[in-house]
Image: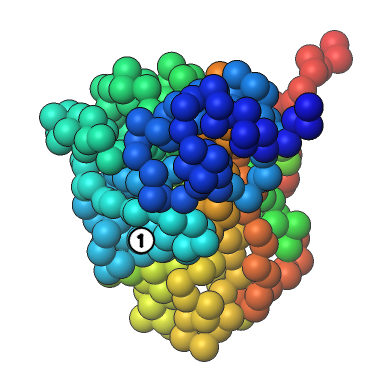
Amino acid sequence: MNKRLRIAEIAARTGLSVSTVSRVLAGKANTSEKARHKVLECARELGVMEGMAAGRLLLNNLVIFAPARAFDERSDIFYHRVIQSISKCLAAYEVRLRYCALEEFDSDAQRFLARMNDPQTQAAILLGIDDPHIHDLAVDVGKPCVLINCRDRRMRLPAVAPDHRAIGEYAADYLFDMGHREIVNVICLRRYTMELRLAGIVDAWRARNLPFNEQQHLLTVPGFSAKETEQRVSDFLAQTAESDLPTAFLVGGDFMAAGTMSALARHGLRVPQDVSVMSIDGFNLAAIQDVPLSAVQVPRDELAAEAVYMLQQRLVRPDAPVGTLLLSGTPALRQSVRRIRPGKDRTAVESEGLYDSLP
């Protein structure tokens, strides 16, 4: 018998009508949860699920859990756009999308369980939720669940995230390739994802046998706003002699880049003629002060698409191995970074060599 959609056999085994089986396997919403469960279990037993068309999403109700700021574009434009992209990815399916705000840590476990145990909830996406207790509960509930830009440290839930470390390394490496050596990194370290980016930046320094000194090469900012960044960079510029100014700033977001450029302008420095600026973001402000912004774009819409695809795969193959998909960034190289000549008197090699010196 053909291993395609063996609808008649599934109908006979489950006692359901052929039309009901067909609706379930087509991902339609007008079937009961009980019928849906019987059809999918039988389809798995017959091996039908593995041969199903990749375009089908066998669920009709999905909950997105995310920090409250993610539902306000003014508070967190990146997460807000990810949620919009999830909605766009699901537009072709009969999926009811619901939302629930949770704290990143110390989340309301009762609220989470109430939503997850709701009979209408068939699957969930956790966006930026770092609370390990919530991850434990998601595993215990047993419904398909995918993480975006966070991780289950016990490796039980599938996840998709930007490759923050590689993105940071690429951005720093690009500045090195453009001849810069005196670089200051402006970063908000409020989440481990930003620490990963910083680790990638440090990797780029080490790959070139350059010493990374936090006091010299790192400015931390409490948030991602232009105002906070402008103040931090302004303070740095006021305390730094002109001869010691960096040739480039690598900043952790477009609004931070806007704040950096404003601070530079207040101190009479032009971008890129006097100082170059590069962002790790590149979506929200294509140009700042009429200067096209060089950036490494962090994957955003791709996170949504891959998360939906992962959910689809968990429904088809619930016992498949669990892993984390890391997505690369996309270079958007514009005019805010200029190529410079090597410094006059600064060495690119650490004083400590790789080998013992000869006697």
Image side of residue 269 versus residue 175, left or right: left
Taking depth in this image into account, of 278 and 353 the one nearest to the observer is: 278
Say what secondary structure mark 1 lies in.
helix
Say which amino acid is labelled 1. Answer: His
Is residue 125 something that shows in the picture? yes
Taking depth in this image into account, of 256 and 74 the one nearest to the observer is: 74
Give the residue drawn at x 35%, y 35%: 33
Q: Which picture quadrant has residue 202? A: top right
Which image quadrant: the N terminus? top right
Give the residue drawn at x 27%, y 59%: 71
Question: Total label count?
Answer: 1
Residue 131 in the image: state x and y as whole percent. Answer: 28, 29
Residue 151 in the image: state x and y as whole percent. Answer: 44, 30
- Residue reaching furthest to the top: 359
Residue 301 in the image: state x and y as whole percent. Answer: 53, 59
Give the residue drawn at x 43%, y 35%: 36
Residue where numbered disc 1 is placed: 80
Image side of residue 178 versus residue 59, left or right: right
